[in-house]
Amino acid sequence: MTQSNWNYPTQIHVGPGRRAELADYCRALKIQQPLVVTDRMLLSLPMVQQVLAELSLAGLEPGVFSEVNGNPTGSEVSAGCQAYLVGGHDGVVAIGGGSAMDVGKTIAVMAHQRCALFDLEDIGDQWQRADPSVIQPIIAVPTTAGTGSEVGRAALIVDAETTRKVIIFHPLMLPKIVLLDADLTVGLPPHLTAATGMDALSHLLEAYCSPVFHPMAEGIARQGMVIVRDHLVRAVANGADLEARTQMQIASMMGATAFQKGLGAMHALAHPLGAHHNAHHGLLNAILMPYVLQANRSVIEAPLASLARQLEVGSSCEDFLVWVLALRDEVGIPHRLTEVISEAVDVSAVARAAVLDPSAATNPINFKAMDYERVLRAAMSGAVDSASI
């Protein structure tokens, strides 16, 4: 794939090998002492060590914060802010999957703030509690293709006191520069390639099904799903396929751009399930997908039939559902939640939390707690037929 530069919704540099330009972009943003935010596993791999070495060779003074878990908490953000201040850093380079992106972005927003982290929960205009003048510049370098957090203005952080995933939002959380370098995704194992790729699909699909009127986001969602159709299976089957890897990075970014239109019940359920059971967010969305689609079927039959025709997988809603099930099977997604969550699930508690989740507001149907309970029980049992949901 040839290299490309885009400017929507932020400055994006696409193509294998673009990480070599990272020091130049730091300097362009007047970042001399970047805090590289990543996770422990990535820090141990050659690619992150090479990035750090390249930054140092270019005369920059990078520091590292790697205390990032799969479902990051407020205490991790606090520790990262402390590392930022102690190290005298002047910008964040977030390298990794969605968790590292979210922590890095939140550190950049919170390091010099006087307000508390959860004061910036995405409710109304609470983001205005932050002082925009002290928000630090962010460069995002994703190593997975799923969350699209590199082009997002929000981050998911667990409030450990309430065991709740909270969406932290500020318009200036959007990274100034994004590097989509597929070379950095080559080492991602097939099961994570599949889970993150299906996460991208969940963003695109829920945005498409949202009842909010947003033709631009709908168009992005449609084309993003074409890219997933053409490239996810290839990326899972051959991790060294740079074309497929690059295209999935693009689809991931498109998903996060499209969900300005909203998300839905997949995310409303995945957020509390992830917070309570520390399960992979993308994998949860992938498992929940057909059950949520079936539960919403009465109002999304026509849109899914149109989508089936565009994707050339049939001409009906049923054809689209069959394609989703076949795709999940082909990339190795488990069929039931019980295959990834071994402990008991408090179905009622998760359902109540789902009703309150911001993603629930744009589900095609205004689900009540009992509706979420039905979807959750179906996803645990593996019953996808409409009579079971």
Image (spheres, rainbow, N blue to C red):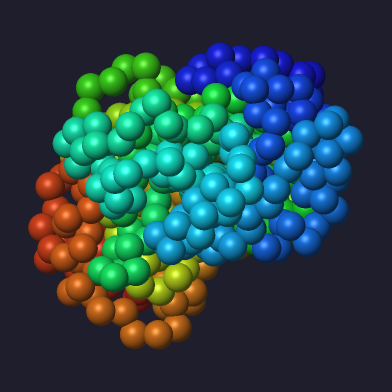
**Of the pair 327 and 377, the residue shown nearer to us:** 377
Q: Residue at x 45, y 70 (%)?
A: 278
Residue 237: x %, y % from top left: 74, 51
Residue 100: x %, y % from top left: 57, 51
Please state, as top left, top right, bottom left or bottom right, where the N terminus lies in the image: top right
Q: Is residue 236 above or below residue 30?
A: below
Q: Is residue 249 above or below residue 195?
A: above
**Of the pair 338 and 348, the residue shown nearer to us:** 348
Which image quadrant is residue 202 in?
top left
Q: How many marks?
A: 0
In the visual, does 2 lie left or right of 327?
right
Please state, as top left, top right, bottom left or bottom right, where the C terminus lies in the image: bottom left
Which image quadrant is residue 91 in?
top right
Q: Residue at x 70, y 31 (%)?
A: 32
Q: Is residue 211 above or below residue 49?
A: above
Residue 168: x %, y % from top left: 34, 45
**Of the pair 302 and 247, the residue shown nearer to us:** 247
In the visual, does 284 lie left or right of 235?
left
Residue 336: x %, y % from top left: 43, 71
**Of the pair 363 and 175, the residue shown nearer to us:** 175
Residue 207 appears in the picture as rendered: no
Which image quadrant is residue 34 in?
top right
Residue 55 appears in the picture as rendered: yes
In the visual, does 252 lie left or right of 342?
right
Extreme residue in the right direction = 57
Q: Residue at x 28, y 20 (%)?
A: 214
Q: Residue at x 29, y 70 (%)?
A: 161
Extreme residue in the bottom direction = 343
